[in-house]
Image (tube, helix red, strand yellow):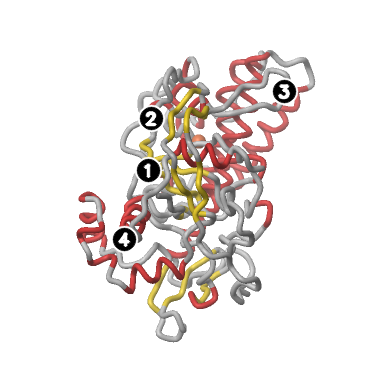
Amino acid sequence: MVQSCPEASPVKWHQAHTTWFFETFVLRPFLVDYKPFREEFRRLFNSYYLSLDEEIPEKKLRGSFSRPSLEEVVAFRAYVDQEMGRLLARPVEEEASRRILLGLNHEQQHQELALTDIKHAFFSNPLRPPYQGASSAKGAEWPIPKLRWMGVEGGMVEVGHAANAEDPQDFCFDNETPRHKVYLEPFQIANREVTCREYLEFISDDGYGLPGMWLSEGWDMVRRAGWEAPLYWERDAGDEAGWRVFTLRGWQGLANLLDTPVCHVSFFEADAFARWRGCRLPTEAEWEHVASRKRPTGNLLDMGMLHPAAARTEEADQLFGDCWEWTASAYTGYPGYRPLPGTLGEYNGKFMSAQMVLRGGSCVTPADHMRATYRNFFPPAARWQFSGVRLAV
Ligand SMILES: [Fe+2]
């Protein structure tokens, strides 16, 4: 039940809330004789759907839910699973199956959040326990490809999800639609993500002390929060590179991670690093145009690494998995965007202010959750997600 920062939620809450989603949006409306597990859960595990309840418990209080106990939350899950089985035993209405697909994708999002939140919770614990196994990092066993620029012609391109009515598994979130045309000037994009070694050069060059490199709001954050490195980096005189990094497998010396992508940086840091290198971040349309030609595979959750890995090929690498990549694009609706009808319209649409888009998934994103059109979004100062940098010019 630990909640170590306001952005994070306890794992028990994630479990209850993903269960709540099926109870609220599938079982209550579509299973005629459904009896709710416990009436209060309707409000307790509502995350942000104001058209269901006007008074939702404040997010920062989720760590105070000592009751219901974990046992009761597990029983809630088992009950909802059993009732979902009863619903699925008969032919299911089209709207119900759409919501079930949404509920499954919602749960995958929370599987990722559970890991990012556990990482933050364990980092906040003075014992700094590993989540899984002990560190065995030895450094990359292959020569990491040099940073190379890939030229892209640009022109009129299409981005956004193209619905495929033939495929019953076809899914995207409403914010990936409609597919639309975008004009791209010719550009170049890096063949891989920025490494810890490259980011360390920025730190050594006093990148965190040069106001000219930073957006105004970013510079204010650097000074207010005392940032001097990515989240989870700590100075370590015993490490050859001078730092150690907290991972889901415990502490690892930075010297062994130098060729792996830098992770847990904010948009402000990604942007400042790019400026310092004389580059910029790609826009989300540029990123998608390049990524849509690749298969959405990589170091995703199913690989079991739980940490970004060094790039392997000279070709566009690490587009999917390793780290989410901050883009230069603000999160807003595509031309002609319409949120889902009803309460579920609150899923994505109402967050379209003051956030930046990230692309490509991370080492804790479930593999079959990822696709080229997927849009993630976080406030520009957020660092607790597995977020990194790809450069463009
Ligand atoms: Fe949720």
Mark whose residue sits in front, 2 or 3: 2
Disc on the earlier residue, 1 or 3: 3
Instruction: Residue at 54% x, 54% y: name it.
Output: 191
Q: How crowded is mark 2: few (under 14 residues within 10 Å), some or many (20 or more)?
A: some
Would you name the residue on which mark 1 appears? Answer: 328
Q: Where on the picture, by quarter, is residue 273?
A: bottom left
Choose mark 2 or mark 1, whichever is in front.
Answer: 1
Q: Which of marks 4 and 1 is nearer the N terminus?
A: 4
Could you say whether the residue bearing mark 3 is in a helix, strand or loop? Answer: loop
Residue 40 visible? The answer is yes
Upstream in sequence: badge 2 or badge 3: 3
Tag 4 secondary structure: helix
Between 122 and 104, the residue placed more toward the observer is 104
* Residue 380 against residue 243 in the figure, above or below: above
Q: Which residue is tagged 2?
A: 332
Q: Mark 3 points at which residue?
A: 168
According to the picture, the residue beneath numbered tag 4 turns out to be: 276
